[in-house]
Amino acid sequence: MGVGWPRRGRRPAAWALALLLPGACADGDGDCAEHIAAAEQFLDEPAHRACDSDADCKVVFTGCHTFPRGSCGQVALSVEAASSSSWRALSADLAECDADHCEHCDAQLVAQCIGGLCGGE
């Protein structure tokens, strides 16, 4: 069942609060600002983007957040970094912050190795 108006007998204040709490994170407030900063630091690390060919790169989803060198909530990482436990944890944090409160475009980023870095400079 999708989000809709509260049914009779439910507390409107509790319903409104349930809608507002995920939105607070989606806007980058509170703990989500820390998760976004941690993800950006990970994504900016050249070692996490090092490549020799396009096959060394993988496009990862970044939720509602489009980071530098990314597009439409996607960015290219090395295959090793994309499959690391560190990225899985950061990705889960971003997904929790998003709570599906954003729109995504239909662009499909292509993983490319440009100048030895996935996604280039």
Image (cartoon, helix red, strand yellow):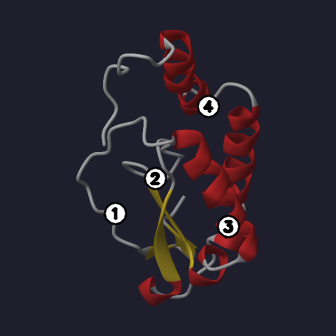
Residue type at mark 4 is Cys
Q: Nearer the viewer, mark 1 or mark 4?
A: 4
Of callouts 3 and 2, which one flags the residue occurring earlier in the amino acid sequence?
Answer: 2
Query: Circle 3 is placed at which residue position?
Result: 87
- The mark found on residue 25 in the picture is 4
In percent of width and height, residue 77 lies at 56, 70
Quarter where residue 121 is shown? bottom right
Q: Secondary structure at mark 4?
A: helix
Q: Secondary structure at mark 1?
A: loop
In percent of width and height, residue 80 lies at 64, 83
Q: CA distance from mark 3 to mark 1?
A: 18 Å
Query: Circle 2 is placed at which residue position?
Result: 70
Q: Is residue 11 left or right of residue 3?
A: right
**Mark 1 surroundings within 10 Å by alpha-carbon count, few (fewer than 14), some (14 through 19), many (20 or more):** some
In percent of width and height, residue 87 lies at 67, 67
Q: Nearer the viewer, mark 4 or mark 3?
A: 4
**Mark 3 surroundings within 10 Å by alpha-carbon count, few (fewer than 14), some (14 through 19), many (20 or more):** some
For the residues bearing labels 4 and 3, Cβ distance under 8 angstroms: no
Q: Nearer the viewer, mark 3 or mark 1?
A: 3
For the residues bearing labels 1 and 2, Cβ distance under 8 angstroms: yes
Query: Circle 1 is placed at which residue position?
Result: 109
In the image, residue 60 sits, relative to residue 83, either above or below, namely: above
Does residue 27 appear in the picture of this structure?
yes
Q: Residue at x 31, y 26 (%)?
A: 4
Residue type at mark 2 is Gly
